[in-house]
Amino acid sequence: MMARIRGWMQRTAAARFDGPERSFGDTVQLVLAMVGHALRMGWRLLRAKYDLRRTDSGRWVTVEGKAIVQGKGKVRIGEHCKLVGYPAPVHISAGRGGLVEIGAETFLSTGVRISAAQAVTIGRGCWLGDDAMIMDTDQHSVDNRDAPPARQRVSIGDNVWLASRVIVLKGVSIGQGAVVAAGAVVTKDVPAYTLAAGVPAKVIRRIGDADENSSASAGGSGGAAGRSAGPA
């Protein structure tokens, strides 16, 4: 915890003063900024306790704005996750017998919607951009709207980035470190460390070297908690 505080102070000083504080006035400004940050963080923690009271949430989960949790299924949220429900709320729905599981240090941006009739699992350190949508069911059959819809688990690996307005449909698996471009509709599996785009989404190219990326991930780098801002 102290390491996080020291890191925040160093980043704030660098941003405000182009380096460490140099005068008493600089120190006062830094202390006031720290107090303001602590108050905002406290409010976001309290907001998370209230909005996510029906979930199994880890430590230091924060909500900025509003998060809505519905359904009689289970929702698990890992520690240090950040939900930004402003201006549009983050919406998580788990139907009876359904499961939504979100790994630690994952970032959910404004307007994100996750719906699970069976299971939606999201790995550690993921970024979900504005208005991204994930659902494991079609909600209604095309031919017979009164028929029970098909359900298929959705699985998203660690350190995946879903950009703004990505839609992930039932039965999809997205591999570790993959990136899905804005506005894509994912109907088929996306391999690890690839960039996918389009409607329907198709793999455009690989991202770096899979072996190097795997080593970096195992070493703990790339988590959303260590980044100052979320995805677009």
Image: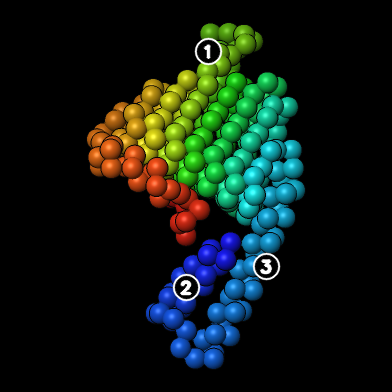
Scheme by which the image is coloured: rainbow
Residue 26 at x, y = what percent?
A: 51, 86
The nearer-to-camera label among 1 and 3 is 3
Q: Position of residue 70 (x, y in %)?
A: 70, 33
Q: Which mark is residue 142?
A: 1
- Is 28 left, or right, of 176 in this rendering? right
State the residue in front, 17 or 71.
17
Q: Is residue 120 above or below residue 193?
A: above
Residue position marked by numbered label 3 in the rendering: 39
Residue at 58% of width from left, 50% of height from top?
Answer: 80
> Who's the residue at 70% across and 22% down the image?
96
The residue carrying pointer 2 sits among few (fewer than 14), some (14 to 19) or many (20 or more) residues within 10 Å by Cα, namely some
User: What amino acid is labelled 3 in the image?
Assistant: Leu
Classed neighbour count for the residue bearing mark 1: other residues with Cα under 10 Å, few (<14), some (14–19), many (≥20) = few
Asked whether disc 1 touches disc 2, contact meaning CB atoms under 8 Å apart, the reply is: no
Residue corresponding to mark 2:
10
| Secondary element at image label 3 | helix
In primary-sequence order, the first of circles 3 and 2 is 2
Q: Quadrant of the N terminus?
A: bottom right
Q: Which residue in the rendered view is the most extreme toward the bottom? A: 24
> Disc 1 and disc 2: Cα gap in Å?
56 Å
